[in-house]
Amino acid sequence: MTLTEICMIRHGETNWNKEKRIQGKTDIPLNETGKSQAGVCCAAAKQFEPTVLITSPLARAKVTAEIINQDLQLPLYEMRAFVERSYGDAEGMTIEDRNRYFPDREAIPNVETFEDLKQRGIKGLEEVCVRYPDERVLIVSHGALINSLLSVISKGELGTGITFLQNTSITKFTCEKGEWRVVDYNNTDHLTPVNE
């Protein structure tokens, strides 16, 4: 029986997160809070007992993965499939400004469509399952990407437009014989020491 377990962690906080700016594919580094969040994520990641570690190539995800990996000591693989959604011309804007100038999020010039995002994410997860059957895979990625996967796997009950994912929150999926299941989402129990 093939059962691949996936644990997805949203990257730590950046200054743009703090300022409520749209990041998308703009490569913004972690701030000090983000580094602390990644640090306390180590124990939760260790508990999952991952055998494989994958990251989005964007710095905020990659550095989060590198901090978590100080304890795990796993080879770190980059996969472009797990990069954040491109928000096109809205990147750098505050959420307030984006909503004012682009009330229709799908009509933002140069935006990656929601359909394309979902397809890219699911294709990435399927590739992981083929490449790492019966493994426990830890993936550090981004809010919109993880939310799009939640939308697909929960058949719209969770995810985009419904679930807000905290920085370094943990979301878990399993894939058994091609059947996907949401095990946990937006778990932030490990962040209590940072948030106090």
Image: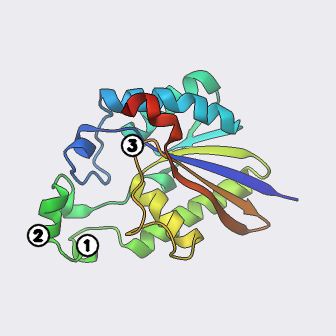
Q: Position of residue 148 (x, y in %)?
A: 47, 65
What's the residue type where badge 1 is placed?
Arg
Q: Quadrant of residue 154?
A: bottom right
Point 65% across, 51% down: residue: 6
In this rendering, the label closer to the viewer, 1 or 3: 1
Quadrant holding the C terminus: top left
Q: Is residue 70 above or below residue 165?
A: above
Q: Earlier in the sequence, mark 2 or mark 3?
A: 3
| Residue 52 numbered tag | none
Q: Quadrant of residue 60?
A: top left
| Residue 58 numbered tag | 3
| C-alpha gap between disc 1 and disc 3 | 22 Å
Q: Residues within 10 Å of mark 2 (few under 14, many from 20)?
A: few
What's the residue type where badge 3 is placed?
Leu
| C-alpha gap between disc 2 and disc 1 | 10 Å
Q: In the rendered image, which residue does mark 2 sit on?
A: 101
| C-alpha gap between disc 2 and disc 3 | 26 Å
Q: Position of residue 188 (x, y in %)?
A: 49, 43
Q: Quadrant of residue 185?
A: bottom right
Q: In the rendered image, which residue does mark 1 sit on?
A: 105
Q: Earlier in the sequence, mark 1 or mark 3?
A: 3
In this rendering, the label closer to the viewer, 2 or 3: 2
| View extreme (front): residue | 196
Residue 120 seen in render: no
Point 46% across, 35% down: residue: 191
Label 2: state its secondary structure: helix
Discs 2, 1 touching: Cβ within 8 Å = no
Discs 2, 3 touching: Cβ within 8 Å = no
Label 1: state its secondary structure: helix
